[in-house]
Amino acid sequence: APAAPVVVPAAFQTAVQALGPAPPAPQERACVLYVGKIPDGIDESLMAALLGCCGTVGRWRRQNDPHSGKLKGFGFAEYKTAAQVLRAQRLLAAVGALAGQPLPLVLQVDHKAVEFLAAYEPEHRLHLAHQVAVRQAALAAGMALPSEHTLSEEEADAKAAAEVARLMAEHGFHGGAPPGDAAAAGLSDGAKN
C-alpha cells in the first residue's frame, strides 16, 4: 500500500516561507574546556556529571597530585560541540558558589578555541533562532512536535541549570540557595561570557 501523503497546514507553510531560507548550520568541532578551582568536596563522578549537564563530554581528565595521589582542583573536559562548551562556560561557574567556595569555577578554552567560538556563536544563534521559529510556527499551526524537538538556548540553559542545581543539592551542596533554586544559586541568570 502506498504511504499516506503528509498534509502540511497552509498556515505553517506561509509562516516558514515568511522566515526565509534557513541560515546554514555553523561548522562544529570538539572543544577542550579547562576547568579550574574545583572545590575539594566535588569528587570525580560528581564533576563528570556536572559537566555532562551541559552536553556530551567525550573525555574528562581531572589531574592528580603525583606525590599524594589526591585529586587536584583542575582538569580538562572535551565537549563534542562548541555550543556545549559555551553552555558550560555560562552555567558551571556557579558551581563554586553552590559548594560554598567564594570563587567561581574557572572555565577557559585555548586561544584558538576562543577565536573559533567568537565566529561560531553568532552563526549558531542565527541558525538556532530559525529552528526555534519553525518549531513555533508548527505549534501555532497545531502540528505535533517530535519528542526531541529543538530547544532555544534559554530553554536548554534552564534545563541544564536545573540539573546542575539538582545534582549539587543531591550531594549536599546548596551554597545558601534552596535545593533546585537555580535563580538564587546564580545558575539561571543567563550571564554570557
Image: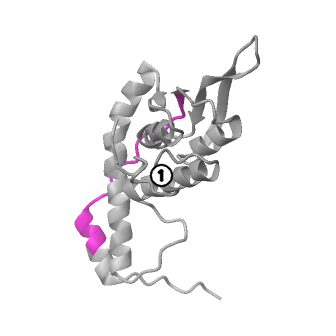
Any magenta on residue 22? yes
Residue that protrudes farthest toward the left in the picture: 18
Residue that protrudes farthest toward the front in the picture: 176
Q: What's the magenta region? A: 15-34
Q: How many marks?
A: 1
Whether residue 57 is situated above or below residue 23 in the rendered picture: above
Q: Residues within 10 Å of mark 1 (few under 14, many from 20)?
A: many
Q: Residue at left 26%, top 75%?
A: 14
Q: Nearer the viewer, residue 134 or 8?
A: 134
Residue 133 percent coordinates (x, y) = 32, 65
Within the image, what quadrant is residue 163 found in? bottom right
For the C terminus, which image quadrant?
Answer: top left
Q: In the rendered image, which residue does mark 1 sit on? A: 161
Give the side of residue 163 with respect to residue 93, left or right.
Answer: right
Give the side of residue 41 with respect to residue 184, left or right.
Answer: right
Within the image, what quadrant is residue 116 found in? top left
Whether residue 134 is situated above or below residue 67 in the rendered picture: below
Q: Nearer the viewer, residue 46 or 78?
A: 46
Any magenta on residue 41? no
Q: Amino acid at mark 1?
A: Ala
Q: Nearer the viewer, residue 86 or 142?
A: 86
Instruction: Indicate the secondary structure of the residue bearing disc 1.
Output: helix
Q: Residue at left 40%, top 81%?
A: 8
For the N terminus, which image quadrant?
Answer: bottom right
Q: Nearer the viewer, residue 57 or 157?
A: 157
Residue 167 percent coordinates (x, y) = 60, 51
Identify the coloring: one colour
Whether residue 95 is situated above or below residue 108 in the rendered picture: below
Q: Residue at left 32%, top 75%?
A: 13
Residue 112 percent coordinates (x, y) = 43, 21
Q: Residue at left 44%, top 26%?
A: 113
